[in-house]
Image: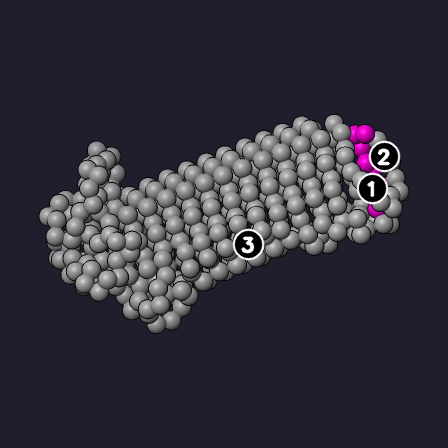
Amino acid sequence: MKTQLTSKMYLIFAAFALLISCNGIAQDDRTPSLSKTFEQNQPGNLYARSSGGSVTILTHDQQQVVINLFIRKNGRLLPPSDPEIEDVLELYDFNIEKKGTDITAVIKRKADFNMWRNAGISLQIIVPEEMSCDASSSGGGLKASGVTGRHQFSSSGGSVHLENITGNTKASSSGGRVKVLNHNGNIEVSSSGGEVSLEGGKGDIKAHSSGGGVHLIDINGDVEASNSGGGVKVTGEAGYLKATSSGGSVRVDIDKLSKELYLRSSGGGIDATIHHGENLGLDLDLKADRVNVNLKNFSGRTDKDRILGTMNNGGIPVYMHSSGGNVNVSF
């Protein structure tokens, strides 16, 4: 149930803040303005929302969930003893509670813009590693690291940054970039406001951007990548790869191709390196202003702007069409 933070609740939070500060749990050398701790001795679910600032999710080796509030007014971080904390809290509604293994941390600012334009609350949550997360921010960026489970992360006011995440994940931003480092599990990433990048991914990947480039580096899994606002780059191991761009070039460098390769660009050229491709059975359909490829054991049609036929008796579909440049293929 949503509740407004009363003076009594403020005192409870302040007591927790003092305890956390004394125990040294506060992260990155900042003391939270307010804190609350819940015991969590088994895997659980975190539901976090902030409409007044950023959200950060971290992990530790303790069986506790620590919820830290960093409260700012006029650009200044308020310490736990600052009397102005209560003034800022009056601008927000809160729902911070634990039910079973579910943790809820919701901060919602009230409607009147003039009341909160000089104030903000950032939410930092420290959880055990095994914690499924559903978290979003509409007032700033979102960061998460180290958690294992099923996850959904989003931001409508800034970027999303994920690191060392395990499990099936959806991540999106409508206000900035989405950056992922070292992800283990299937993942869907999208941005309508910036670049999408994933470096070090094991699992199937779906990626889309309408506001910047898509860069998938050192991946291992099937891939679908699309971009209506820039180019696409993919490197790593992929049995199946589909990459399309209407706003830039498509560049891929892949190994372990076994199912299908589909590349299309209407905004630039296509450059593809297929490791060990000269030994694969390929069904080639290549079209561009100019197609550059060294063919081996080929049967079919060859023109400067079109290759249609098979290599090594065919097998794996390879489609590359560009209406904005050349197609360059190397094996």
Pick out the residue farthest to the bottom: 41
Real-space CA distance between mark 3 and mark 2, rounded to the nearest whole angstrom: 37 Å
Secondary structure under tag 2 reads strand
Residue 305 horizontal/vertical position (percent): 79, 30
Q: Residue at x 79, y 48 (%)?
A: 278
Pick out the residue farthest to the left: 83
**Image-based side of 1 in relation to 328, left or right:** left
Residue 142 horizontal/vertical position (percent): 38, 47
The answer to whether marks 3 and 2 mark residues whose Cβ atoms lie closer than 8 Å is: no
Q: Residue at x 46, y 44 (%)?
A: 178
The answer to whether marks 2 and 1 mark residues whose Cβ atoms lie closer than 8 Å is: yes
Secondary structure under tag 1 reads loop
Secondary structure under tag 3 reads strand
Around disc 3, counting alpha carbons within 10 Å, would you say few (fewer than 14), some (14 to 19), or many (20 or more)?
Answer: many
Mark closest to the chain's N terminus, 3 or 2: 3
Q: Amino acid at mark 3?
A: Gly
**What number is the disc on residue 295?**
1
Q: Which residue is mark 3?
A: 201
Q: Residue at x 12, y 49 (%)?
A: 82
Q: Which residue is mark 2?
A: 302
- The boundaries of the magenta stretch are 304-311
Q: Quadrant of residue 68?
A: bottom left
Mark closest to the chain's N terminus, 2 or 1: 1
Real-space CA distance between mark 2 and mark 1, rounded to the nearest whole angstrom: 10 Å
